[in-house]
Image: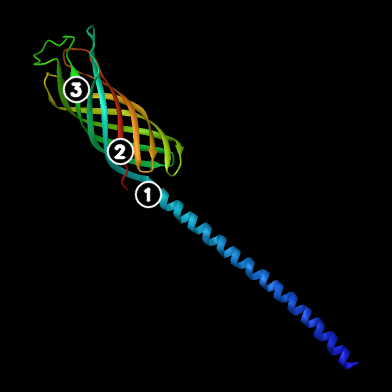
Amino acid sequence: MQKYIFQKIHHHFTINMKINSKTKHIFLVFIFFCIFLSITYAQKENNSQKRSQKEFFAFGPKISINITNEWIHQKGYTEFLPGADLGLFFRFSISRLYLQHEINYVIRNQSNTRGYVTFPCPTNEYKSHHLDIPVLVGVKAIDFKLFKIRFFAGPEFCVKFKDHISKNDFQLGFQLGSGVDIWRFTIDASYSFLGNIHPNFSGHNNIVKVGVGFKCY
């Protein structure tokens, strides 16, 4: 009888040990799973914060091709001629919105083929050298990590360095356009309207630009 009771107790104890062992294994697996999820989530949040901090500010070189013409009141337009921009851009981003400030040294090739300018000009085409400073506000319509589509607009300030024809030393205008970011490369296409061409004439410049920049952090 005692042997039978001992066998029953041993059998019951063995079964409980097996159940407890299985429960322990399940519990340990659950704990490790929770720890894994916590580490993964923390790493994701850390990477997201680093990305946000990294993308808050960007700057880099930028080169553009411009085509420019002039319009003078009662005289009409000149033909479009190509020129070049070389400068730096500085971008501050908050979520999908951003502020971009640029400093560009600009060479514009302009035409005098219609002869409306009464001042001395040795050729029908001439170069003008400027410092252009656009201050642009933009929105990222599509904002992925390695691909963005942007739209922007803002005032543009232009200071003349050198010109073959006497003109105003300062112009104020407006720029609008769109852009694409692919990895660290940024591609912009824009139109600028710059007024106050000449103190004796009412007119403006029309400028179309396509530029490529590289974002440095």
Relative to the observer, which residue lies in front, 133 or 209? 209
Q: Tag 3 or tag 1, which sits nearer the N-term? A: 1
Q: Which mark is residue 109?
A: 3
Classify the position of the N terminus by image quarter: bottom right
| Residue type beneath disc 3 | Asn
Q: Give the left or right position of residue 134, taking residue 55 as reference.
A: left
Is residue 10 placed above or below 98 in the rendered structure?
A: below
* Element on which disc 1 rests: helix
Q: Residue furthest top?
A: 74
Residue 141, image x, y percentages: 45, 34
Q: On the image, numbered disc 2 is attached to which residue?
A: 213
Is residue 42 placed above or below 136 in the rendered structure?
A: below
Residue 81, image x, y percentages: 23, 20
Q: Quadrant of the rendered structure where residue 46 is?
A: bottom left
At x 26% / y 29%, what residue is drawn?
Answer: 65
| Residue type beneath disc 1 | Lys
At x 30% / y 38%, what residue is drawn?
Answer: 213
| Residue type beneath disc 2 | Gly
